[in-house]
């Protein structure tokens, strides 16, 4: 295969798999906390990730490859109740740009702009009266709508299709300010055709586990692991050597500046990747307002 065809094929496969990575259901510690009925949260996320290594599954590293991702997310959650069961409704919309995008030294086009609108509904099956020593269990059903900017062959934030992503979230309080935050989810993406080309992505899975220390009622620190698995991307049933497989460690810190305003920061690094870009450095800040 010529270098031009190789680069085109790699960028083509990246377009099918990048949206799946962008839509990964990353939680932050304490996200599955049950809040009182009628509470509304407004959240804004800003994230930067830089990668200077592209590894194709079965083919190894592609030299002179890089990607910088600058991402924002606007999100709203509302807590309610159905019978005796706490529930939450939410929606979020990502937007951003892909910069310094290189594959083998070439610079394929990337698709900046707005990502897919995601709607979510959470049911809390266990909500202890004393969260500091009990276990909270919630199940969220996410529905991703293909509203984002999408162009076959250009990696971007839009997926061009519908995705269903159920996520199980758990918080367990050990007492004395120690907590475990965990989540498991699966991404099921609908096959679709673009310009006569069939695009399909295998189911991908994500596991997250964090240990949190509540230093005071207003301040906490956390650290832990996030791993994604599966998600092989195909075009016309041809595997493009791209998939959602990676392992990352993260550290978090959060502080309630006022009783209704919180700032949360995260730093992370990916230490293993198969079939995609390896994020050497990830930084995120989240602003949350309670209404």
Image (cartoon, helix red, strand yellow):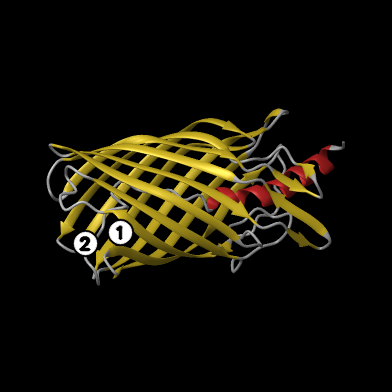
- Rendered view: 224 above or below 28: above
Total number of numbered discs in the rendering: 2
Earlier residue among tags 2 and 1: 2
Name the residue at 43% across, 48% down: 26
Q: Residue 114: tell me if it is visible.
A: no
- Rendered view: 130 above or below 116: above
For the C terminus, the image quarter is: bottom left
> Whole-percent x and y of residue 195?
81, 63
Name the residue at 17% across, 42% down: 133
Other residues around mark 1 within 10 Å, as few (<14) / some (14–19) / many (≥20): some
Other residues around mark 2 within 10 Å, as few (<14) / some (14–19) / many (≥20): some
Q: Please, what secondary structure does the residue beneath circle 2 have?
A: strand
Quarter of the rendering containing residue 258: bottom left
User: Would residue 194 be found to the left or right of residue 176 on screen?
Assistant: right
> Whole-percent x and y of residue 146?
61, 66
Q: Nearer the viewer, residue 58 or 192?
A: 192
Tags 2 and 1 in contact by the CB under 8 Å rule? Answer: yes
Name the residue at 59% across, 41% down: 244
Q: Give the number of the disc on residue 262.
A: none
Q: Nearer the viewer, residue 211 or 99?
A: 211
Q: Nearer the viewer, residue 176 or 125?
A: 125
Give me the C-alpha separation between circle 2 and circle 1: 7 Å
Q: Give the residue pinned by disc 2.
A: 261
> Whole-percent x and y of residue 27?
39, 49
- Rendered view: 291 above or below 213: below
For the N terminus, the image quarter is: top right
> Whole-percent x and y of residue 218?
15, 51
Name the residue at 45% across, 39% down: 207
Q: Give the number of the disc on residue 287.
A: 1
């Amino acid at each position: 295969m010529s270098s031009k065809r190789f680069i085109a094929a790699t960028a083509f496969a990246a377009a099918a798999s990048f949206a799946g990575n962008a839509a990964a259901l990353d939680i932050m510690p304490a996200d599955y906390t049950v809040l009182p009925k009628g509470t509304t949260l407004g959240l804004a996320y800003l994230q930067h990730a830089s990668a200077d290594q592209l590894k194709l599954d079965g083919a190894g590293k592609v030299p002179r490859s890089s990607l910088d991702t600058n991402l924002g997310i606007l999100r709203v959650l509302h807590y309610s109740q159905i019978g005796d069961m706490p529930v939450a409704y939410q929606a979020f919309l990502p937007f951003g740009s892909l910069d310094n995008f290189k594959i083998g030294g070439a610079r394929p086009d990337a698709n900046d702009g707005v990502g897919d609108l995601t709607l979510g509904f959470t049911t809390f099956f266990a909500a202890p009266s004393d969260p500091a020593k009990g276990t909270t269990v919630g199940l969220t059903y996410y529905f991703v709508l293909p509203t984002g900017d999408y162009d076959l062959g250009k990696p971007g934030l839009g997926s061009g299709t519908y995705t269903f992503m159920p996520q199980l979230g758990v918080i367990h309080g050990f007492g004395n300010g120690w907590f475990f935050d965990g989540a498991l989810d699966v991404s099921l993406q609908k096959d679709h055709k673009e310009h006569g080309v069939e695009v399909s992505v295998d189911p991908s899975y994500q596991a997250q586990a964090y240990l949190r220390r509540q230093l005071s009622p207003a301040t906490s620190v956390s650290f832990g692991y996030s791993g994604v698995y599966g998600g092989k991307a195909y075009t016309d049933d041809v595997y493009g050597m791209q998939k959602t497989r990676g392992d990352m460690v993260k550290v978090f810190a959060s502080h309630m500046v006022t009783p209704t305003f919180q700032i949360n920061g995260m730093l992370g690094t990916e230490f293993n990747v198969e079939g995609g870009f390896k994020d050497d450095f990830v930084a995120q800040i989240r602003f949350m307002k309670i209404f």
